[in-house]
Amino acid sequence: MNEVAQDVVAFGGDVLLRSTARIEGGLVVLGGQVDREEGAQVRGQEVINPHGWSWGRWGWVDVPVYPYFPSDGFPALMFQVAIWGLGILLQAVVIAGLAGLVSVLWPQAAARVGRRALGKPLPALGMGLLTLVISILLIIGLVITLCLSPVGIAAAIALVVAILFGWVALGIAIGERLMPTFTNRVVAPFWTAALGAGLLSLLSNLLGLIPCAGGVGDLLITCVGLGAVVLTRFGTME
């Protein structure tokens, strides 16, 4: 920027001040940094990340977090725990809604994948782990080769879709096991699937709290679901 006659406020972003920059008002930066070249002038008050502004996570999104408490101590800890809990709930709601839609749009395919995952988890686990390793190596090789990078990107998208479909199908199967008496009602497929997938997402996040072993639960669920998807050809066969 060259000259600004008013205040400059940046929320969750960085500010670059060139040597010719002139700010007649104040400069406020929350959750970011200021890169100032020699000669830049700010005539008003400067406020840069006051009292513990820092980066936190809300679901999958990084956001600047300001605890309205001291920067340390029990109140600040509880505030961060509350933000973390909201992120987990948001993720569970998204997964639950997706599972509900899949149960309505592709009920047979999801049911086949779920039955395979719960009925024979060990073969599904082995197939999923093998598929995951081979797919990652293949995608890396394709992306490195510039001429085949579009194929690698398409393969990565297909892998993500398969993993997500496996997660959702496994959640739907769990929901049907938890609510068997509601399967004949009109609204049952959507809400049963949402319940199972939401609980599976919450369980995965709670397992993530275990030190050194938190990622094992995610890996197991991912491999079992992915293996069931591969073995049933995306639910097209038993």
Image: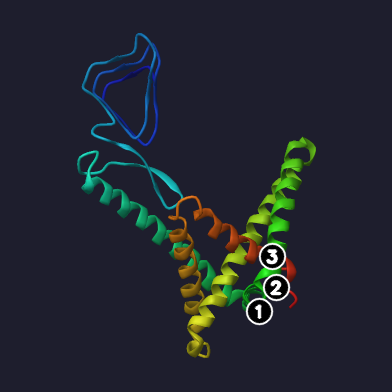
Q: Where residue 94 sits in the image (x, y, percent)? A: 47, 63
Position of residue 228 relative to residue 185, above or below, is above
Label number found at residue 58? none
Q: CA distance from mark 3 to mark 2?
A: 11 Å
Residue at 51 percent of width and 87 percent of height: 180
Q: Amino acid at mark 2?
A: Gly
Q: Amino acid at mark 1?
A: Gln
Name the mark nearer the viewer: 3 or 1: 3
Q: Where residue 184 sits in the image (x, y, percent)? A: 52, 91
Q: Amino acid at mark 3?
A: Gly
- The residue identified by callout 2 is 235
The reply to whether callout 2 and callout 1 are in contact (CB within 8 Å) is: yes
Position of residue 8 relative to residue 129, above or below, is above
Query: Dot 1: within a 10 Å radius of its alpha carbon, few (fewer than 14), some, or many (20 or more) residues?
Result: some
If you read the primary sequence from the N terminus, does the residue marked by circle 3 or circle 2 appear first?
Answer: 3
If you read the primary sequence from the N terminus, does the residue marked by circle 3 or circle 1 appear first?
Answer: 1
Position of residue 79 relative to residue 102, above or below, is above
Q: Quadrant of residue 233?
A: bottom right
- The residue identified by callout 1 is 108
Foreground of the two, 238 or 207? 207
- The residue identified by callout 3 is 227
- Left of 151 or right of it: where is 5? left
